[in-house]
Image (cartoon, helix red, strand yellow):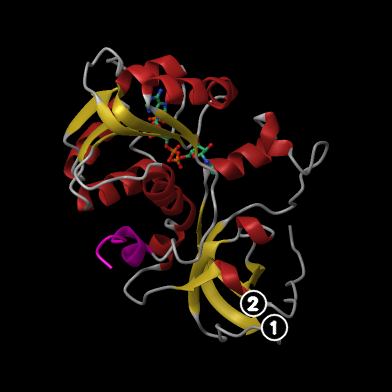
């Protein structure tokens, strides 16, 4: 469909999109499933043009923009300020965008914002990850998991990764200490205990995850079923009190600072 090039507001910049990544969130909003994806647009989509993770070039700036100039190469998650990255041009609040390092391609930069920030905030903020901990990543071979694996290995974690057969070699090459093929093995029967679980899939019961956690361990749900969300909300506090095992649900906070990968990943080294 041909649309007119949009005009930026005073605090926005006009970006020509050079690359973007498609996340599961785009897919959920496109289909209106699960039902939570309809918040703000029950009968018709709230956003006409999806696309959150963009990398591109600033073409024009609004009068109040302070930190960006025409010609700047930028990237960022624009899900909090209107989406629209699937179009050729999009107007974006300047606070959503970071300068793209010149050593990075547009494609590499567009792969970072949502997946890497979820991984970082899941480990660091909700998980209170400590150097050297034993970590399980369920759904490790996708966007969030591969960032989480790299971050955790930088911090000396022992990492077990769960995913399908075809991704296990890649995960080992990226540093996974153990891998579990979910199509052939049951991670709960595996018998290992973990200090932290980062769960992208969220397809088990809270009792399975409780069994996998070491004493004082923490479970962080990045994605998963409504049933597990309810269990965490209603049973999580009771289990925490009785067994001192914590259950948290990550709520994505797009964050300009966190999306500047190499600085954020080394958060304890700064
Ligand atoms: N918390 C928040 O605020 C927030 C915000 C945005 C998105 N999200 C969530 O983030 C998640 C998207 O993460 P992502 O981009 O990393 O997804 P992704 O790239 O699709 O990766 C998911 C991985 O999990 C694997 N997998 C599928 N079923 C599995 C199972 N039963 N056991 C283990 N692994 C399994 C997939 O492998 P195969 O396909 O080969 O099976 C895939 O490698 C979604 O759940 C989404 O809802 C959360």
Query: Tag count in the figure?
Result: 2
Q: Which residue is mark 1?
A: 62
Q: Is residue 27 left or right of residue 152?
A: right
Q: Name which quarter of the figure residue 59 lies in.
A: bottom right
- Vertical comparison of 242 with 4: above or below: above
Please indicate, yes or no, whether residue 119 appears anywhere in the rendered image. yes
In the image, is residue 269 part of the stretch drawn in magenta? Answer: yes
- Report, in whole angstroms, how far the alpha carbon at label 1 lies from the one at label 2: 6 Å
Q: Which residues are magenta?
A: 261-270
**Mark 1 touches mark 2? (CB < 8 Å):** yes
Q: Which residue is mark 2?
A: 13
Residue positioned 52% across, 85% down in the render: 71
Residue 155, percent from left and from top: 22, 51
Please indicate, yes or no, whether residue 86 appears anywhere in the rendered image. no
Residue closest to the eye, 53 or 138: 138
- Disc number at residue 14? none
Residue closest to the eye, 19 or 226: 226
């Amino acid at each position: 469909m041909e649309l007119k090039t949009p005009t930026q507001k005073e605090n926005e910049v006009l970006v020509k999109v050079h690359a973007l990544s498609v996340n599961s969130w785009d897919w959920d909003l496109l289909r209106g499933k699960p039902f939570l994806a309809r918040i703000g647009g029950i009968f018709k989509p709230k956003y006409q043009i999806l696309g959150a993770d963009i990398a591109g070039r600033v073409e024009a700036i609004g009068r109040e923009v302070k930190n960006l100039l025409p010609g700047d190469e930028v990237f960022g998650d624009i899900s909090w300020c209107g989406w629209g990255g699937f179009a050729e041009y999009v107007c974006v609040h300047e606070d959503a965008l970071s300068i793209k390092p010149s050593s990075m391609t547009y494609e590499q930069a567009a792969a970072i914002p949502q997946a890497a920030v979820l991984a970082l905030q899941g480990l660091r903020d909700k998980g209170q990850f400590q150097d050297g901990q034993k970590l399980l990543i369920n759904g490790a071979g996708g966007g969030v998991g591969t960032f989480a694996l790299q971050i955790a290995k930088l911090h000396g974690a022992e990492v077990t990764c769960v995913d399908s057969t075809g991704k296990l070699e890649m995960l080992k090459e990226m540093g996974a200490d153990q891998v579990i093929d979910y199509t052939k093995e049951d991670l709960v029967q595996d018998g290992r205990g973990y200090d932290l679980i980062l769960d992208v899939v969220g397809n088990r019961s809270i009792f399975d995850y409780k069994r996998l956690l070491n004493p004082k361990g923490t479970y962080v749900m990045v994605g998963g079923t409504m049933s597990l969300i309810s269990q965490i909300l209603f049973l999580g506090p009771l289990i925490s009190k009785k067994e001192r095992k914590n259950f948290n649900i990550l709520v994505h906070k797009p964050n300009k600072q966190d999306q500047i990968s190499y600085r954020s990943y080394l958060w304890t080294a700064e």
